[in-house]
Image (cartoon, grey):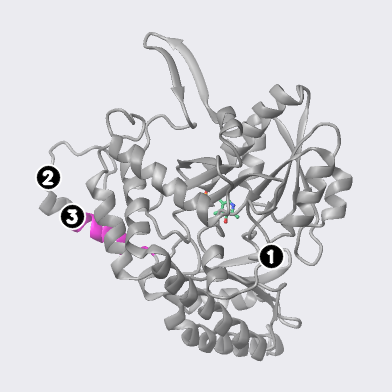
Amino acid sequence: MSSALPEHGAPWSEVEPRLRDLGKGDVKWRDGRTGMYIFNAGPEVEQVQKAAYAMFSSENGLGPAAFPSLAQMEREVVAAGLSLLNAPPGAAGAMTSGGTDSIFLAIKTARDHARAKRGLNGALNIVAPASVHPAFDKACMVMDIELRRIPVKDYLADVAAMEVATDANTLMIVGSAPCFPFGLIDPIEALGEVAERKGLWLHVDACVGAYIAPFVRMNGAQLPAFDFSVPAVSSMSGDLHKYGYASKGASTVFFRSEALKEFMTFDAGPWPLGRMITPSLSGTRPGGAISSAWAVMQHLGIDGYRQKQGEGTQAREKIEAGVKRLGFEVLGRPQLGIVAFAHPKIDALRIYAQMHHRGWFTAALIEPHALHLMLSPKHNEVAHEYLADLEASLGAVSEEQFTPKYAG
Ligand SMILES: *Cc1c(COP(=O)(O)O)cnc(C)c1O
């Protein structure tokens, strides 16, 4: 098939089946065998997500005066996020296109704030645990900032080593809640003490935690303080298109005060239209990403999220118990939706290959070699299938191990 623009157009009735065909090679995530990229809260949420997206997919969040609807939805989504994360009165935030975007903007804001308020104009660095997301590397590449990745201790931010790594040019220190590789919440309170002592900006990357952790806590889990309840936290990132179950292209970035958030604004130009003042990096902002996030929040509400996140954590507990029975060791003590586990005798990457062969599309860790699952409510229905396949994979790999490769 040619990829060039067709000479003659076709009606939707012909385009739609072609789209369906294109999708046939994709991972079958609705069956629950995908443990990355996708957050599956069931068909009803998917329907709300898509219908709400379609309603505003032509509208543009760049123009709040033209689309007060989107401006109001964004305000309400941000307000919901701020209240879930224990933000104080006067805190502020914005919707962005994703976690990477939110992290970029938090760093840009901290940098411009530091230039204005700390007179920090030379080379800058950010001190973060080795487990922080590569979005930090990307933002630092673009903004010419050195990212100091400090080895983790028991899979968590090593606060003492991070403090030692800070200096007069340190812009920011970072903790994750949780980090993606291990699914563990860094010691944010201890990082807060360092930030306070050194006068540093503390960012908490809750991209994959902001919209699950508050509900897991409401469901009764004892989570450590990880949000704005820690006074030194200046900014946070939280993705709506992860455990918020919104359509892709939706995240939030939050600041302790409106005064901090002002440093996020881009005042660009002049060009023939004058100055262009935008609250975030984006020009055009997809209305559908905003309306979808808003609609899913309205649809689920606190009780709906509690229910969904409860199913996700149940899935995690079942899988943790099951993998331990099979001789695996869980890395750290996960409390949210991500779990990673390694085998003391068998290379997890060989088991991973077996699982992939059996139709499980998940991530794996390289350091250390471990299996990784990012769990959704749907996984609660298929946890037993995963464990059965894991047992079979383990058997297959052990057999391989004891069969001489070049026998005869
Ligand atoms: C997913 C994730 C990001 C990046 O978010 P994108 O939406 O993929 O850009 C950043 N940090 C953590 C901890 C994440 O899990």
Q: Quadrant of residue 6?
A: top left
Q: Is residue 335 left or right of residue 154?
A: left
Which residue, as the protein is rendered here, is positioned at the far front?
89
Quarter of the image where one finds residue 26: bottom left
Q: SS for tag 1?
A: loop
Give the residue number, with chain letter if any, for mark 3.
16
User: How far across and how far down the image is residue 32, in percent?
Assistant: 42, 74
Give the residue at mark 2: 10
- Say which amino acid is labelled 2: Ala
Q: For the residue marked with disc 1, what is the amino acid?
A: Pro
| Magenta segment, prevailing SS (helix, strand or loop) | helix
Q: CA distance from mark 2 to mark 1?
A: 56 Å
User: What is the secondary structure assignment of the residue under circle 3?
Assistant: helix
Magenta stretch, residue numbers: 17-26
Toward the viewer: 318 or 16? 318
Residue with the mark numbered 1: 224
Q: Secondary structure at mark 2?
A: loop
As for residue 24 lying within the magenta part, the answer is yes
Q: Is residue 250 magenta?
A: no
289 to 276, vertically: above or below? below
Q: Which of disc 1 and disc 2 is earlier in sequence?
A: 2
